[in-house]
Image (cartoon, grey):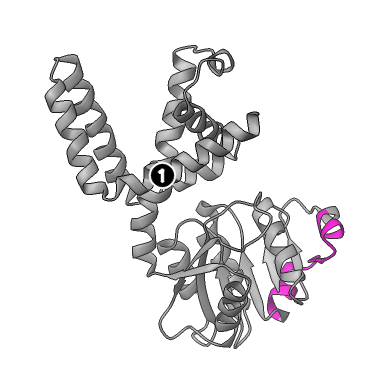
């Protein structure tokens, strides 16, 4: 197995993961970080294209906006019966590029691990795969079997279904948290001091805002490039303005009606309350 971008955080995580499952793992990165391979106990690809031609599986773990370009370079060198897969957060364009750049007898598998490289294990984590009709074979099946055997929840979507879902699951979530962080900056609000007075919900929200802000801005910017996220952001901003306008004009009934309608659409809000209570109680115990 060759992991292109294996010197990065996500690539390194999966290099360790597949190394521990018996794969002969080789990694490559554009900055030539040989020491990363040494630390992981895997090989470094000194001749990238030769390694591509010899590999059973090539994994692309590169920035989303570069994935089609890298696939176009790697795909033609893939050997018959091998597998080309990616680990990016968008699927329509990467999968199309992988299909178009490879021979029809090369397997193609889009994969999106729904967790970051800080997670110690894949158990209990979700991995979305986007198989391509006619391009599924023994290596794709083997990858899925390994993930499921190790306790991952594997979900199957088409590339378009994936990107539409991620426009909310990722793009909207990240956008809203980053907007909160940017608002705190614009207000010159003393975040550290506010922790002395915070409610349980504010504490949890603040930690999630900080979690997002602590990570790679390039990754989070590229996730917003999801072609379906533009409409999601537009609706989100419209709803924010509508709620704000209701309050500004003293229309409390309108505000409450919006909240009740949102609760009806959300469904089973009480279970969400109970789950969040467990998180809040756990945080309280940690402080004690």
Please indicate, yes or no, whether residue 198 appears anywhere in the rendered image: yes
Q: Which x, y percent locates residue 243?
A: 21, 26
Q: Residues within 10 Å of mark 1 (few under 14, many from 20)?
A: few
Residue at x 52%, y 54% (from the top left corner) = 64
Q: Which residue is mark 1?
A: 274
Q: Which x, y percent locates residue 48?
A: 73, 67
Dominant secondary structure of the residues highlighted in magenta in the image: helix
Residue placed most toward the observer, 219 or 205:
205
Residue 38 falls inside the magenta stretch: yes
Quadrant in which the N terminus appears = bottom right
Q: Which x, y percent locates residue 176?
A: 40, 35
Residue 87 sits in quarter: bottom right
Residue 275 falls inside the magenta stretch: no
Marks counted in the figure total: 1
Along the horizontal axis of the image, is 16 left or right of 67? right
Residue 77 sits in quarter: bottom right
Q: Which x, y percent locates residue 152?
A: 56, 67
Along the horizontal axis of the image, is 117 left or right of 41? left
Eyeballing the image, is 223 above or below 23? above
**Numbered disc 1: secondary structure:** helix
Please indicate, yes or no, whether residue 226 appears anywhere in the rendered image: no
Q: Which residues are magenta?
A: 36-53
Residue at x 64%, y 29% (from the top left corner) = 287
Quadrant in which the C terminus appears = top right
Residue placed most toward the observer, 278 or 257:
278
Eyeballing the image, is 246 above or below 167? above
Residue placed most toward the observer, 99 or 59:
59
Eyeballing the image, is 64 above or below 126? above
Residue at x 60%, y 88% (from the top left corner) = 80
Residue at x 22%, y 33% (from the top left corner) = 238
Eyeballing the image, is 130 above or below 83? above
Along the horizontal axis of the image, is 218 left or right of 274? right
């Amino acid at each position: 197995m060759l992991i292109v971008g294996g010197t990065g955080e996500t690539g390194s995580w999966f290099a360790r993961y597949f190394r521990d499952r018996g794969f002969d793992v080789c990694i490559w990165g554009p900055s030539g970080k040989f020491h990363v391979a040494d630390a992981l106990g895997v090989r470094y690809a000194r001749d990238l294209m030769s390694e591509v031609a010899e590999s059973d599986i090539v994994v692309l773990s590169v920035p989303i906006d570069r994935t089609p370009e890298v696939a176009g370079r790697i795909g033609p060198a893939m050997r018959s019966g091998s597998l080309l897969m990616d680990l990016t957060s968008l699927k329509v364009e990467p999968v199309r590029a992988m299909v178009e750049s490879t021979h029809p007898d090369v397997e193609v598998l889009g994969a999106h691990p729904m967790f970051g490289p800080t997670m110690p294990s894949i158990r209990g984590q979700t991995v979305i795969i986007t198989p391509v009709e006619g391009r599924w074979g023994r290596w794709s099946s083997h990858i899925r079997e390994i993930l499921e055997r190790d306790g991952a929840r594997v979900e199957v979507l088409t590339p378009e279904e994936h990107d539409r879902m991620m426009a909310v699951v990722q793009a909207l979530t990240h956008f809203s948290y980053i907007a909160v962080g940017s608002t705190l900056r614009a207000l010159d609000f003393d975040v550290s001091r506010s922790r002395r007075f915070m409610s349980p919900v504010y504490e949890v929200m603040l930690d999630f805002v900080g979690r997002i802000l602590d990570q790679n801005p390039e990754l989070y910017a590229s996730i917003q490039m999801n072609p379906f996220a533009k409409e999601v952001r537009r609706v989100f901003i419209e709803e924010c303005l509508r709620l704000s306008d209701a309050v500004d004009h003293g229309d409390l009934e309108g505000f409450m009606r919006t909240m009740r309608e949102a609760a009806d659409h959300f469904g089973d809000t009480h279970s969400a309350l109970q789950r969040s209570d467990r998180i809040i109680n756990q945080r309280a115990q940690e402080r004690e």
